Amino acid sequence: MREITYAEAAAEALREEFRRDDRTVHLSTDAPLQLQKEFGRDRVRVTPISESAFVGAAIGLAGSGFRPVVNIRMATFMFVAMDQFINQAAKITYMFGGQARFPIVYRVSVGAGMSMAAQHSISPYSMFMNIPGIKLIIPSTPYDMKGLLKTAIRDNNPVLSFEHTALGQVKGEAPEEEYTIPFGKAALRRQGSDVTVVALANMVHVALEAARELEKEGVSVEVIDPRTLVPLDKASIRESVARTGRLVVVDEACQTGGAAAEIASVVVEDSQTFKRLRSAPVRVCAPDVPIPYSPPMEKFVLPDKQRVMAAVKEALK
Amino acid sequence: MPIEPQDLIEMYKTMLTIRRFEERAAREYEERHIPGIVHSYIGQEATATGVCANLRLDDRIVSTHRGHGHCIAKGADLKRMMAELYGRKTGYCKGKGGSMHIADFSVGMLGANGIVGAGLPIAVGAAMAAQLEGGDRVAAVFFGDGACQEGTFHESLNLASIWKLPIVFVCENNGYGVNTPAEYSIPVKDIADRAAAYAMPGVVVDGNDAAAVYEAAGRVVKAARAGKGPALLECKTYRWRRHAESKAFAELRPTGEIEAWKSRCPIASLERRLLEEGMATGQELADIDSQVLALIEEAVRFAEASPWPAPEDALEGVYSV
Ligand SMILES: Cc1ncc(C[n+]2csc(CCOP(=O)(O)OP(=O)(O)O)c2C)c(N)n1
Ligand SMILES: [Mg+2]
């Protein structure tokens, strides 16, 4: 199959969906040039650096019949527009009694590992998991990027797409033809029988490396990538843990109150799955510190293959 | 376009509807038939009315926490509004919004808003939609003097200006944000002066004079329809009641000031004009009032007779299908 990068997959998804539906519009502080060339400066519009205004404008556009895609670039820039995300975009479908639909895609890049320091290294998934009304996708491969983003653009709700910075130039298979990926369906990245590892975004790749390494030591690791955090495919995670009896969750966000905590809860609160657990779930996350700048410190706080392997062994004890 | 007697009479009726609706809402709140919080629009009726009289059904507005007047002026249904205040299933938002979140997308009312200043970006989006559609629709957004110190005010005016959007920013300067005087919060003489920073016309108008608001709004709406871009319209007005219908909000404004503004009642002054210029008789105006009161009574009856939402309805409608 054809291979393209994660970034190219996103561009292709947008191009296909913009051709398919002329109510799509694009807002971002710098223009995606190819898209702008094909669809013009009106529809693919550059905005000043005014996050509150353009995050909110997308809501007005959606409420007026359009399908905006907003590229906010780094997740951290969302914080200056939080009211528009949380009090407006997420809540108004419900608060207005479902009178109108708000089909909006907000794209943000997440993740650390680039010595970008604390403000520019953040993966704020769980903050948004706690806000009903926004769907959350978290593609980890070019294939998923294209399929999930296309589904997101067609969805009639606000969707927040968390896209990992480190994956931009990573290549992977993605068909040229049309396909979409349904929300709420996890991907089984690797089959195994001893331990279930649920990993997010770039950590999927780290978990797979760890799994390959552990195989040599005779440990069989199953790797699950939820692909969407809202909705979350609880059934697949529980089913896997019920088989292996052990859970490790890998997420590079800070540990306290994170997505990893939610995933562990989904497993332990289900009595059927709980009965099958043979050891306590283990989380592999960043410690609760702002992400530091200097490489030795940054490397120290981010989960890596060694920490995942150690966690799997911990679960096996 | 000179203002026609018929327009004035229509506006009189709209203002009176808002007044009677708000009087009744205050009473029902007092009697605990309406929970939560209600921000009364009494005293400011001429603003929503004069602006919306220039708008078509397909134009879009965005409103504030003090939004009942905007809803009524844009043509929303009194029964479904009152039912929403009562928290009933038949309300505009099925009882999930209440006073601060009434919306009626079918008449282009894109929602009241509990967050000060939050409506401006949304209205910018509605105006961008109008521009992309290529017709001559416009958007209008209402907000208070207090909202003009929020970042969203500045970001939104700037965006509307560089994109030449068909939008009118309607500032209802009632002199206070809760009990903080606008003079304290705002260093410029008129909020409309800030329009210059965004290269758009800034217009000050007597917000208690419905005809003046109608004419001033008419000019900027017409320009917006013609593709000439946005404007900032500052309507100087005053709210008669405390910030909200709850004793939790003390009234700290000087009594003399409140009385002075009450003597400039937007409805009474239009009434005088209609009578003096022979556009209506006292009897005709009294008939309008009875009609309005009957509509409000009907709305209250409807709300009272409406079913409560089932508790588990709370779990429905977080997402659209
Ligand atoms: C962002 C935000 N801050 C504070 C509040 C609390 N609050 C509600 S109404 C209000 C006053 C707003 O004043 P203004 O914009 O002049 O509108 P008015 O109430 O006078 O109509 C305040 C401070 C809020 N709702 N939202
Ligand atoms: Mg005010």
Image (spheres, grey):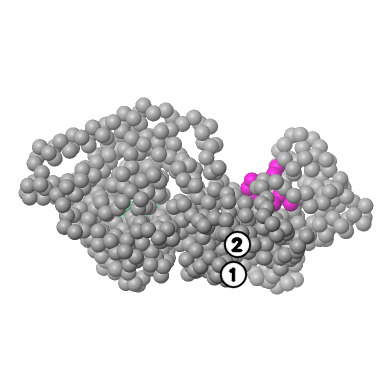
Residue A233 colored in magenta in the image: yes
Callout 2 environment at 10 Å: few (<14), some (14 to 19), or many (20+)? some
Return the residue at label 1.
Answer: A34
Q: Establish if A307 lies above or below A113.
A: above
Q: Mark 2 or 1 closer to N-term? A: 2
Q: Determine the secondary structure under disc 1.
A: helix
Q: Is residue A188 visible?
A: yes
Q: What residue is drawn where x is 72% and y is 58%?
A: A175
Where is residue A157 shown, x and y percent of the image?
54, 49
Q: What residue is drawn where x is 20% and y is 53%?
A: B210
Where is residue B22 shown, x and y percent of the image?
28, 41
User: Is residue A126 toward the left or the right of residue A219 in the image?
Assistant: left
In this orientation, which residue lies closer to the viewer: B265 or A99?
A99
User: Is residue B133 toward the left or the right of residue B210 in the image?
Assistant: right
Q: Establish if A239 lies above or below B170.
A: above
Tell whether label 1 touches label 2 (CB within 8 Å): yes
In this orientation, which residue lies closer to the viewer: B46 or B126?
B126
* Region rendered in magenta: A225-234
Q: Is residue B195 visible?
A: no
Q: Hey, what amino acid is under mark 1? A: Gln
**Which of the chains bears the disc numbered 1?**
A
Q: Hey, what amino acid is under mark 2? A: Arg
In this orientation, which residue lies closer to the viewer: B248 or A261?
A261
Q: What residue is drawn where x is 16% and y is 47%?
A: B6
The answer to which quarter of the image holds residue A284 is: bottom right
What's the mark number on residue A15?
Answer: 2
Q: Quadrant of the N terminus of chain A?
A: bottom right
Callout 1 environment at 10 Å: few (<14), some (14 to 19), or many (20+)? few
